[in-house]
C-alpha cells in the first residue's frame, strides 16, 4: 500500500510539473489599482556606454516560445520597490504580449535590466 501511494504521488507531481502556468501565476505589479502580470521571460535590456549600437534591446520571443512581444506601450516606465530603502528598485515597461498557450494578447509588465558594455 505504501509503494502504491508513493507511485501515485510521483505521478501527480510529474503531471502538475508539466502543466503550463499562466502569466498571472508569476509576480504582478499594481498600475492604476490593477494587478498587471510581470513576464520575466521577455526582459528589456538597456546597454550603457554602447557606441554605435542600439541603446535598448527588446526580447522578441521567450526561450520556450510561449510569449511573443506585440508592442511596447507608450505608458511611462513603472517603478516598484523590491525591499526597504536604500534597496534597489525594479523598473518595468508596459507592453502587449501574445500568450501562445492561452491564445490571447494581454497587457503585461516587462522587466528592465541594465548592462554595461566594455570599451
Image: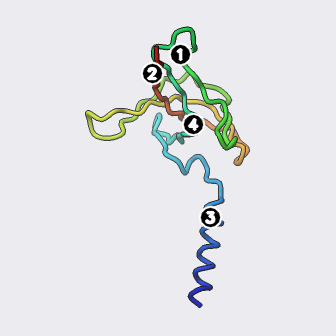
Choose between 52 and 100: the one closer to the eye.
Answer: 52
Q: CA distance from mark 1 to mark 2?
A: 11 Å
- Label number found at residue 16: 3
Q: Give the SS element for disc 3.
A: helix
Q: Is residue 53 above or below residue 12?
A: above
Going from N to C along the chain, the mark reached first, 2 or 4, is 4
Q: Is residue 108 above or below residue 51?
A: below
User: Which residue is found at the position 57% from the left and 13% from the top?
Assistant: 53
Q: Give the SS element for disc 1.
A: loop
Q: CA distance from mark 1 to mark 4?
A: 22 Å
Going from N to C along the chain, the mark reached first, 3 or 1, is 3
Q: CA distance from mark 3 to mark 4?
A: 25 Å
- Label number found at residue 108: 4
Q: Give the SS element for disc 4.
A: strand
Query: Residue 110: percent from the left, percent from the top?
Result: 54, 33
Q: Are marks 2 and 4 in contact (CB under 8 Å)?
A: no
Going from N to C along the chain, the mark reached first, 1 or 4, is 1
Mark 2 sits on what residue? Answer: 116
Query: Residue 61: percent from the left, percent from the top?
Result: 67, 34
- Label number found at residue 55: 1
Looking at the rendered image, the disc whose residue lies closer to the viewer, 1 or 4, is: 1
Looking at the rendered image, the disc whose residue lies closer to the viewer, 2 or 4, is: 2
Query: Residue 106: percent from the left, percent from the top?
Result: 64, 38
Q: CA distance from mark 2 to mark 3?
A: 39 Å
Relative to 67, is 88 on the left or the right?
left
User: Which residue is found at the position 36% from the left and 39% from the top?
Assistant: 82
Q: Quadrant of the N terminus?
A: bottom right
- Label number found at residue 97: none
Going from N to C along the chain, the mark reached first, 3 or 4, is 3
Q: CA distance from mark 2 to mark 4?
A: 26 Å
Q: Residues within 10 Å of mark 1 (few under 14, many from 20)?
A: few
Amino acid at each position: 500500500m505504501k509503494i502504491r501511494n508513493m507511485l501515485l504521488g510521483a505521478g501527480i507531481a510529474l503531471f502538475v510539473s508539466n502543466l503550463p502556468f499562466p502569466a498571472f501565476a508569476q509576480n504582478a505589479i499594481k498600475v492604476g489599482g490593477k494587478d498587471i502580470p510581470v513576464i520575466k521571460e521577455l526582459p528589456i535590456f538597456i546597454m550603457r556606454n554602447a557606441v554605435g549600437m542600439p541603446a535598448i534591446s527588446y526580447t522578441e520571443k521567450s526561450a520556450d516560445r510561449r510569449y511573443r512581444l506585440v508592442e511596447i506601450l507608450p505608458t511611462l516606465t513603472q517603478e516598484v520597490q523590491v525591499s526597504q530603502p536604500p534597496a534597489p528598485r525594479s523598473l518595468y515597461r508596459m507592453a502587449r504580449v501574445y500568450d501562445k498557450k492561452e491564445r490571447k494578447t494581454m497587457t503585461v509588465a516587462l522587466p528592465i535590466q541594465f548592462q554595461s558594455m566594455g570599451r
